[in-house]
């Protein structure tokens, strides 16, 4: 689904969905967060912070900071693999909307 088709699915009286959609655009406006979300979407079993940091090319600290913002919005959730903090996308309507918007930017 492209962005135009997605936008046609939004009922302008559905305030919750409008808020989710506009929040999605704000979250996607940061290139680092966009990259992190793309990585996590592709990862079947989530990724640890150090893996995300290596892939995105930023420090562990900066990665943790961005993941914290995403976790605060309920987009990602943290789990432990040994001593490592790892993250995966949550399975919510908001994240599904976010992924739909992200996919529309592929072309």
Image (cartoon, grey):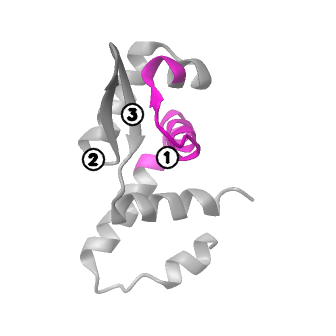
Disc 1, disc 2: CB below 8 Å? no
Q: Is residue 52 above or below residue 28?
A: above
Work out whether residue 106 or residue 88 is closer to the camera in this orientation and state it. Answer: 88
Quarter of the image with the C terminus is: bottom right
Distance from the alpha carbon under mark 2 to that under mark 3: 14 Å
What secondary structure is the magenta-colored segment mainly? helix
Q: Is residue 60 above or below residue 66?
A: above
Q: Is residue 33 left or right of residue 80?
A: right
Q: Residue furthest right?
A: 107
Q: Is residue 9 left or right of residue 90?
A: right
Foreground label between 1 and 2: 2
Q: Which residue is mark 1?
A: 29
Q: Where's residue 83, x and y in %?
A: 32, 13
**Span of residues in magenta:** 27-51
Q: Earlier in the sequence, mark 1 or mark 2?
A: 1
Foreground label between 1 and 3: 3
Q: Residue furthest front?
A: 82
Quarter of the image with the N terminus is: bottom right
């Amino acid at each position: 689904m492209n962005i135009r088709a997605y936008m046609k699915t939004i009922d302008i009286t559905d305030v919750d969905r409008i808020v989710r959609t506009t929040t999605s655009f704000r979250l996607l406006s940061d290139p680092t967060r966009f990259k992190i979300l793309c990585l996590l979407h592709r990862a079947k079993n989530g990724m640890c912070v150090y893996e995300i940091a290596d892939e995105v090319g930023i420090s562990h600290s900066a990665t943790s900071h961005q993941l914290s913002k995403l976790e605060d919005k309920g987009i990602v959730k943290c789990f432990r693999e040994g001593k490592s903090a790892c993250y995966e996308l949550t399975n919510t309507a908001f994240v599904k909307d976010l992924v739909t918007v992200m996919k529309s930017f592929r072309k």
